[in-house]
Amino acid sequence: MLNKFYTDALGMKRYLQDLTRMAAQISHRYPHMSVLEVGAGTGGATKVILRELDNAFGSYCYTDISTGFFNEAKETFRAHKAKMTFKALDIEKDIVEQGFEEQSYDLLIANLDVHATKNLEHTMRNLRRLVKPGGYLLLLEIKDNNPLRFGFILGGVPGWWLGHDDGRIMSPCVNIPAWNEVMRKTGFAGVDSATGHVETCPLSVMITQAVDDRIRSMREPLLSPNLPEISKTTLTIVEGTGTKSSQLT
């Protein structure tokens, strides 16, 4: 029943489409990327993601905190077996001790999973260790506590209350500004983009880039402390033909 909730509940299909659309945009630029999905469970979201990626990836690591779903998942995704691996992953524990190599993935996908941890900052630091500098983290999360139906449905599950000592008392969910803050603290760029929501389904797909000094200077070269001196003889401005381009130039 919960698997059906995560794929078919009110609004979920729309947000899964947003998630997979953004993953596909990344794969268009990096068609040989290595992907890791966090908390894949029975693979409800994975089916949609793989259909949208259309084989434009180099490898896909299917993870969950338990290996109980893996036999069924291997059968479900047998068409992709040459590119898929299945590994247990607890994102609250040290990733190296669980057999994962640091900075080895281009894209991490977490679908309604990260909030169900005791400390968001600790969890996000673990995720940052998995992704390469310049790589991306895609999150689908609940970002508004006002609609009560999520609490009624999931309030009986212990994971709904794991964030109590982290200040998330009424539910494990936080809003986009809070996500932006924790991302910036843990080696990500902050919320680069986030989809909107309707009142009845307060979810959002957020994307953030893993950054280090090199990636930060590439993202904002004019703010880099290591910016070389630019003389008039070495500066070239290429102007487009539109009005906005001319104004920018």
Image (cartoon, rainbow, N blue to C red):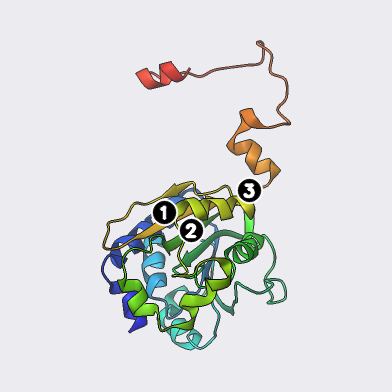
Q: Which residue is most to the top?
A: 232
The image quadrant where one finds the N terminus is bottom left
**Residue 22 circle label:** 1
Q: Earlier in the sequence, mark 2 or mark 1?
A: 1
Please report the residue visible at 69 percent of the width from the left and 63 percent of the height from the top: 102
Residue at image coords 45%, 82%:
73
Identity of the amino acid at label 2?
A: Leu
Q: Which residue is mark 3?
A: 211
The amino acid marked with disc number 3 is Val
Dot 2, crowdedness within 10 Å: few (<14), some or many (≥20)? many
Q: Identify which residue, 237 or 168, lies in the foreground.
A: 168
Taking 173 as reference, is 34 left or right? right
Residue at point 42%, 21% (across, down) = 245
Calculate the distance from the C-alpha at mark 3 to the C-alpha at mark 2.
15 Å
Label 3: state its secondary structure: loop
Looking at numbered disc 1 in the image, what kind of residue is underneath it? Met
- Closest to the observer: 188 or 62? 188
| Nearest to viewer (mark 2 / mark 1) | 2
Residue at the disc numbered 2: 138
Q: Position of residue 129 (x, y in %)?
A: 67, 61
Residue 216, quarter of picture: top right
Label number found at residue 153: none
Check whether the beta carbons of the residues at disc 2 and disc 1 lie within 8 A of each other.
Answer: yes
Distance of label 3 from label 1 (alpha carbons): 19 Å
Pick the front one: 34 or 146: 146
Label 2, label 1: how far apart the Cα atoms are = 8 Å
